[in-house]
Image (cartoon, grey):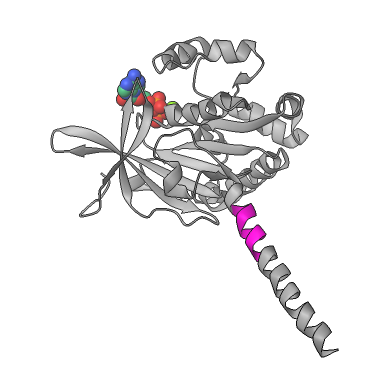
Amino acid sequence: MAKKSKKSKPSRSKKKGKGRKSLKEKRRRKRVKTGIKGMDKLIDGGFENKSINLVVGGSGCGKTIFAMQYLMGGLKNGENCLFITFEENKDEFYKNMEEFNWDLKKYEKEGKFHFLEYSPEKVNSMIEEGGGEIENIVVSNNITRIVVDSITSFALLFEDELKKREAALSLFNIIRKWNVTSLLTLQENPSERSSKSSSLEFESDGIVLIYFTREKKKRERFIEILKMRGTNHSTNIHEVNLSGKLGFTVTNKTHSEGFKGN
Ligand SMILES: Nc1ncnc2c1ncn2[C@@H]1O[C@H](COP(=O)(O)OP(=O)(O)O)[C@@H](O)[C@H]1O
Ligand SMILES: [Mg+2]
């Protein structure tokens, strides 16, 4: 008897240890690379798989480019991606993205990239239908990455905070149902953040802030991870570069002292 229990003890603890390890391993593996050089190491390897993330910044900070670069990361990885926009004209957008050597026409022809110019009202009716046309596109094309640019226009449809929150919840529930990893842009100066968008921020899994600040006589871009559920993320303010050659790149420089983000 004693022999038996001696034998079984180590094997049980071995199993237990293995179980714990694999759970950790599982969590670590479930990461979606952002496609932004230098960014993944700030957020434990990438966005959590199937998470909903917000990228928040003022006008011209680069939210749209950031979001498209995230989809390009997916396209280069053989994934199918969907860009839903309330703001951009397709031809102009494709042309602008050529600046970064992103050949969206090619990916579209291959059936890998889908671009939808939608009105916020149309998205609202999609929610009321429980998925509608967008869901068909997502399911039939096996879409894994989605961008909504920008959620601000959608939020503006609703006057009071409660309705906004309900709509955000419905939209988020639908996106979650699709099993995609999504990025929604939000137009708001990070240093003047108001309570207006708090419901969106509350419902999202991750929040990335992009600052476009004036430093002496020139503007510079910085990035901050404000929130990333289940992630031991950087708490520094990182300098980012935006160039036609590389798109967004997070540099090794951090900005910590006296940063107001204005
Ligand atoms: N080729 C480029 N090289 C460097 N910066 C660029 C390039 N193209 C655009 N930008 C910068 O990106 C800005 C537009 O970014 P965009 O993503 O549209 O901003 P947002 O969506 O936040 O309003 C431009 O105003 C410019 O500062
Ligand atoms: Mg934009």
Res. 194 visible in picture: no
When the figure is inspected, residue 207 is found, relative to residue 221, above or below; the finding is: below
Per the rendered image, the range of residues in magenta is 20-27
Where on the picture, by quarter, is residue 25?
bottom right
Residue 45 horizontal/vertical position (percent): 50, 46
Question: Does 118 appear in magenta?
Answer: no
In this image, 49 relative to 207: left or right?
A: right
Res. 88 visible in picture: yes
Where on the picture, by quarter, is residue 105?
top right
Main secondary-structure element of the magenta-colored stretch: helix
Count of marks overlaid on the render = 0
Nearer to me, 134 or 120: 134
Residue 251 horizontal/vertical position (percent): 31, 39
User: For ligand 1, which image quadrant applies?
Assistant: top left
Specify the farthest residue to the left. 216
In this image, 221 relative to 225: left or right?
A: left
At x 65% / y 37%, what residue is drawn?
180
Specify the farthest residue to the right. 1
On-image quarter of the N terminus: bottom right
At x 49% / y 51%, what residue is drawn?
198
Specify the farthest residue to the front. 3
Nearer to me, 14 or 51: 14
Nearer to me, 159 or 223: 223
At x 27% / y 46%, what residue is drawn?
261
Residue 102 horizontal/vertical position (percent): 47, 17
Where on the picture, by quarter, is residue 124?
top right
On-image quarter of the C terminus: top left
When the figure is inspected, residue 139 is found, relative to residue 55, above or below; the finding is: above
